[in-house]
Image: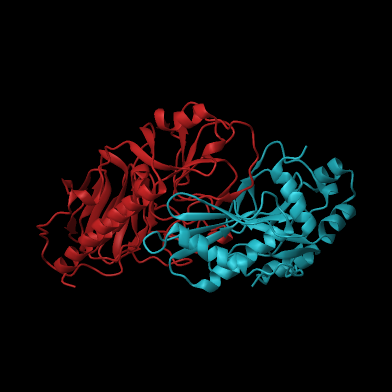
Amino acid sequence: MGISVVKPGMLTTVQDLGRFGFQKYGMITSGAMDKLALRLGNLLLGNEEDTPALECTSIGPSLLFQKQQLICVTGADLSPAIDQRPIPIWKPVVVPAGAQLTFGKPKKGWRSYLCFYGGLDVPKVLGSASTYLRGAIGGWQGRALQKGDQLSFCVGWPQESSSFKWRMASSCYRGLANKVIRVIAGPHHPLFDSESQQRLTADLFTISSNSDRMGYRLESANLYLREKKELLSSATTFGTIQVPPDGQPIVLMADHPTTGGYPIIAQVATVDLPLMAQLRPGAKIRFALITIKEAQSLWRAQEDELHKLKLSLALKYGE
Amino acid sequence: MLNPPTLFLILSFMMNKPESVSYYPLGDSAVVAVFSEAISEQVNHRIRLVGLGLDKLENPGILEYVPAFTTITVYYDLLSIEFAEVVEQIERIVAALPEEIHFSSVNKVIPIWYDGPDLDEVMDYTGLSKEEVVRLHSENEYIVYMIGFAPGFAYLGGMDSRLSTPRKPTPRLKIEPGSVGIAGAQTGIYPIETPGGWQIIGKTPVRLFDASKEIPSFLAAGDRLRFDPISEAEYLRMKGADYGD
């Protein structure tokens, strides 16, 4: 017993932190687009960080709960409500048996994570429950949720109590209003002409409607190499910004191919991938160049913050 | 006049000495080791050996690696290991590589029923008979330069240049898994159903990618393989037996 899908939403998939260790075989890693939101949602429920949850895109699903459960919604604010009563995000909420969870207007951000106490009961494929849509691998039958699907919980929420009087410190998740994405110069940055190099940090880039879990196409002035050069394919990763010959950059996202042959002008700092994941088509962003050392210390600072959160949550969940 | 890198390549080839390895970062948590500017069997083999060396390290800070034509990219956990340490680990493996490389012999055989929808187009373009296409395609030994583009998709080297045929002007929306194709001077096998523009000359009953297996890909970078022509009856029999286990 768990949830029954009344409406599937625009694109609702099961995701965890991704499928790693098989990229040398060409296996796409997948996993949550906004990993920080997924990790926080799970931590707030006392789950392991990589517990499988639902990634809801833009228009969330309507789900009937057949059993009482504790949930936590994080990431984008897609106006979640239980039986029409709005519920807070970033906070555990008890859903009574027979209640319906719905989502409404996307207020802020683009991808919301619906985490369940103990997680969803989906089989692991190559060590992960993440859905790889194009390969129809993993998650819920290798596909997005459809009307009528029945997903089970691993465990139920046994307690009557439904009051959680604490809140997550806002410093754990950077605001979605920030539209500056920090990047590190890519291996082929020096091959671009100086105008293109300047444009990378001076211009506004628009997220095109032709964007999905595999990558975001950006609309901008064209970026060009000093001279045409054919490159040999090499590894690409989450956040790689590659520029095909048409000059319009693509930011590779969670379902990125493992290798590619286009020049790489920059790489999004790992700490800013969640910001990128929450951008909606039409959003305008700027890039700021930082050094690898800066990117790494930003990541360490974030992980320190998360560690503190884990410690205080361990006390709250009495572990 | 040759530019210095080209000259260096020629010299190193003449001396049969491997080039030195250079390193650059890919973002804040990956090291790319570059073994050469050009594709070669020697470079492919060295990269394969470095991969095996990384497997043996069992260093928890080194998460995974992706071999490619001339590079190997190593992903690391920046909380437990530094860029420089990763480079040092790779250097140590490189230093221990044998100077003389003994290429391994064929270790994979892929049966193919040469009955693709584009055989006629390939015959027309190349001026070869069906028998010649089959013979030339199955006579050579191939090397897996890298896996990429799609799960289990192998970039192969070694196709006879007489088989070169340009891609189809309009890609097919759906290509069956196991389809064997030619695109320009390349040949390859589609592991999963995907759209594609390659000239399909046959199909294999081997499952090239199976996510339910511990090692999901039939082929790995560095493999050497041969194609074995089979009949329709053999194809159907092998297909039923889930050949590739």
The location of residue B132, given as percent across then percent down, is 89, 53
Q: In this rendering, would A125 be left or right of B226?
A: left
Residue A141 coordinates in the image, percent (x, y): 45, 60
Which quadrant: the N terminus of chain A? Answer: bottom left
Colour of the chain lettered B: cyan
Q: Is residue A42 left or right of residue B8?
A: left
Residue A193 location (% of width, % of height): 55, 30
Residue A289 position by quadrant:
top left
Q: Residue B240 lies in what quarter of the image?
A: bottom right
Q: Nearer the viewer, residue A122 or A235?
A: A235
Q: Residue at x 25, y 64 (%)?
A: A117
Task: Answer with left or right where residue B72 lies relative to residue B62.
Answer: right
Instruction: Answer above or below: position of A256 versus B140.
Output: above
The answer to whether residue A183 is above or below residue A202 is: below
Give the residue at x 44% y 50%: A254
The hue of chain A in the figure is: red
The answer to whether residue B204 shows anywhere in this view is yes
- Residue at point 46%, 62% (across, down): B85
> Which residue lies at the image location 10% right of the left edge and 64% below the top edge?
A161
